[in-house]
């Protein structure tokens, strides 16, 4: 599967809403009942301040959006955040997540981030394995964070210079 990554555009919002819903449904099941609106994803993908930059990327294959990732760079603290990532379930384990992560990594490195932070649900074993493969380690837990009975695992990794 050939994947290209580019910055998110407003025209991608409907596809992103569908992908994120389907992706999250793979581990949340019936806990998630309806997708966020395209407007939600437009808002989540934009905005910056003098000390923080937000960037969102989409992965495309054969002209179709198949993945989404949103990241931040806190310029004052050198702290990058992987806010959210989702891949069309039909494209799991086909390089979409890696391509999106490579774009995020280049973004963080271009802004000299010293540490990257993210979190994932304790029931999302696929994401946990992926983050560990990418060098993240668990730093804590948020009990019953988004849903009763589902903890969020806080993960981080330090960036190596060069």
Image (cartoon, rainbow, N blue to C red):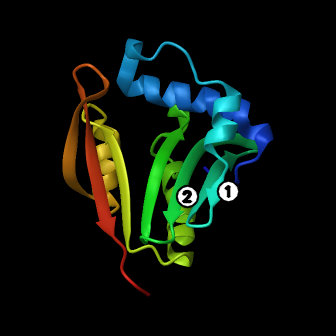
Percent coordinates x, y for residue 129 in the rendering: 28, 48
Q: Dividing the image into 4 quarters, which one contains the C terminus?
A: bottom left
Q: As drawn, is 126 to the left or to the right of 98?
A: left
In front: 121, or 91? 121
In front: 116, or 47? 47
x 72%, y 29%: residue: 14
- Say if residue 56 shows up in the picture: yes
In front: 77, or 68? 77
- Say if residue 2 shows up in the picture: no
x 70%, y 49%: residue: 8
Label 2, label 1: how many angstroms apart (C-alpha)? Answer: 7 Å
Instruction: Name the outermost residue toward the right.
Output: 11
Per the image, label 1 sits on a secondary structure element best described as: strand
Q: Are marks 2 and 1 in contact (CB under 8 Å)?
A: yes
x 49%, y 31%: residue: 23
Give above or below for 157 relative to 42.
below
Instruction: Name the outermost residue toward the bottom.
Output: 162
Please give the residue where the numbered disc 2 appears in the rendered image: 99
- Quadrant of the rendered image containing residue 153: top left
x 36%, y 57%: residue: 117
Number of callouts in the render? 2
Per the image, label 2 sits on a secondary structure element best described as: helix
Q: Which mark is residue 4?
A: 1
Nearest to N terminus: mark 2 or mark 1: 1
Percent coordinates x, y for residue 96 in the rendering: 54, 50
């Amino acid at each position: 599967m050939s994947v290209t990554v580019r910055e998110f555009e407003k025209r991608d919002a409907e596809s992103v809403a569908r992908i994120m819903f389907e992706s999250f449904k793979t581990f949340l099941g019936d806990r998630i009942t309806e997708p966020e609106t395209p407007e939600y994803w437009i808002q989540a993908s934009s905005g910056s301040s003098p000390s923080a930059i937000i960037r969102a990327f989409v992965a495309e294959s054969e002209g179709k959006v198949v993945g989404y990732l949103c990241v931040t760079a806190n310029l004052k603290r050198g702290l990058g955040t992987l806010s959210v990532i989702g891949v069309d379930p039909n494209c799991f384990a086909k390089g979409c997540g890696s391509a999106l992560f490579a774009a995020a990594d280049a973004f963080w490195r271009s802004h000299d981030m010293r540490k990257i932070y993210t979190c994932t649900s304790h029931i999302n074993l696929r994401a946990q394995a992926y983050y560990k493969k990418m060098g993240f380690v668990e730093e804590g837990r948020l009990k019953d964070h988004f849903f009763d009975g589902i903890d969020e695992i806080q993960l981080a990794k330090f960036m190596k210079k060069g």
